[in-house]
Amino acid sequence: MWGLISYLNSPELVGAFQRCCGLVPRETCSRVSQNGLVHANGSGKNGPVTIHRRGAEQVANGTSRAQDSNSNYKPASSPCETKGEEHPRPRYKVRNWLFYFLFVTSAALGHEVFYITFLPCIHWNLDPFLCRRLVNMWAVVMYIGQAMKDILKLPRPSSPPVVKLETRVDAEYGMPSTHAMAATAISFTLLLSAQERVKFPFELGLIVAVVLSALVCLSRLYTGMHSALDVICGVVISAIIIALSYPYWGTIDYLQLHNPLSPIVGVVLPLFLSYKYPELDHYSTTRGDTTIILACCSGCSVGYWVNERLGLTFDLAGPFPVTLPPLTLVALGLGVARFLVGLGMLVLTRQTVRWASLRVLCRISGASVSDVDARRRKEIEVPYKFSTYVSIGLVNSILVNRVFVMMGLWDLGNSV
């Protein structure tokens, strides 16, 4: 069993998959920090294993032996270092552009741009009920996955032999793959929830869910950001969460919409979890990204509760499951118009609230807005990101559809 686990966690397996798909390193090189060390998690910080590039010495647990006592020590040069680059990246060659575009596009399905477009689009063009379910499950699986990463602190695949295509999340740990978790959770939550609301061939929906989840999972191997073990664990964890929570989805819906304490819990609990997120000895994007996700869920949760109080939820009209009308050019045009108007409102909200909250918090803390290190401090990062994305959730769930009605982009006959 341990041999199988070691094999699935091997960077050589990831490298072999990349080469099989036509992504090969142009030359052997590694991410190098100023002191000439290659760090296991690619963060430039001391990780579980540190390898000294000058000789065969390996230093475990980030010990200070990596610092050469000779003040004139210079790290060994790398064949792929370029002048002026502090963190050179591996150069690679693409021999199969079909796989490259397929997997890079699939990897984008786990980024903020996808979530801030796909989830609201479900709300604006299909059914807010489905969006609510998706946002709830997205927040749960992502918090569990992100927290597990920073508790387990298992490194990402090493480079070489792996070619890494992403840089922003390179400082994060690897186990489990939150891309795999989110893709699995969103695909199958949508499948299971949609069958309650809309008539469609379940077998076709199942195939689409499996294919989309598999593409996102394989993209994490192709981009070199996760081992096969990271991906498998991510899928399994999401499957367990869905299986355990599925019987209670209806109860959660009812409490979220009708319980008078719902808006309080919807704000206090995510904010508490954001502040209590596991601490690291170096900065990582995981806390900020998790705060964004929890804040979106918080804002949407409060917004759905407010809509229920106001008596206009914009949900599909029953009895369920309903038969969706055919997709005509007029319906497609209205859908595109709603998407563009809604996205514009969300982007405007993001930029406005982010600008204002950052300046208020930096003034309170006596820091400069342009000071990147100050903006990464918990007392600034958590509240400014939380307030920004709570606002986005509120605008998405309360205001956008009402603007559609004012602009003639929404037919109230389709809602209850």
Image (cartoon, rainbow, N blue to C red):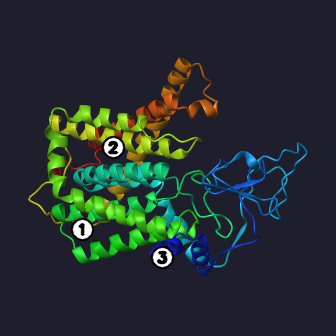
- At numbered mark 2, what does the secondary structure look like: helix, strand or loop? helix
**Badge nearest the viewer, 3 or 1:** 3
Q: Would you call the spot at circle 1 few (<14 residues within 10 Å), some (14-19), or many (20 or more)?
A: few
Q: CA distance from mark 3 to mark 1?
A: 50 Å
- Res. 4 mark: 3
Q: Amino acid at mark 1?
A: Pro
- At numbered mark 1, what does the secondary structure look like: helix, strand or loop? loop
Residue receiving disc 1: 326
Between 28 and 308, the residue placed more toward the observer is 28
Q: Residue at x 67, y 64 (%)?
A: 159
Contact, mark 3 vs mark 1 (Cβ under 8 Å): no
- At numbered mark 3, what does the secondary structure look like: helix, strand or loop? helix
Q: Residue at x 16, y 58 (%)?
A: 247
Q: Earlier in the sequence, mark 1 or mark 2?
A: 2
Q: Amino acid at mark 2?
A: Cys
Image quadrant in which you'd find residue 371: top right
Whether residue 102 can be seen here: yes
Contact, mark 1 vs mark 2 (Cβ under 8 Å): no
- Res. 414 mark: none
Residue 367 image offset from top left, x and y in percent: 60, 23
Residue receiving disc 2: 297
**Badge nearest the viewer, 1 or 2:** 2
Q: CA distance from mark 1 to mark 2?
A: 31 Å
Q: Earlier in the sequence, mark 3 or mark 1?
A: 3
Q: Residue at x 49, y 32 (%)?
A: 354
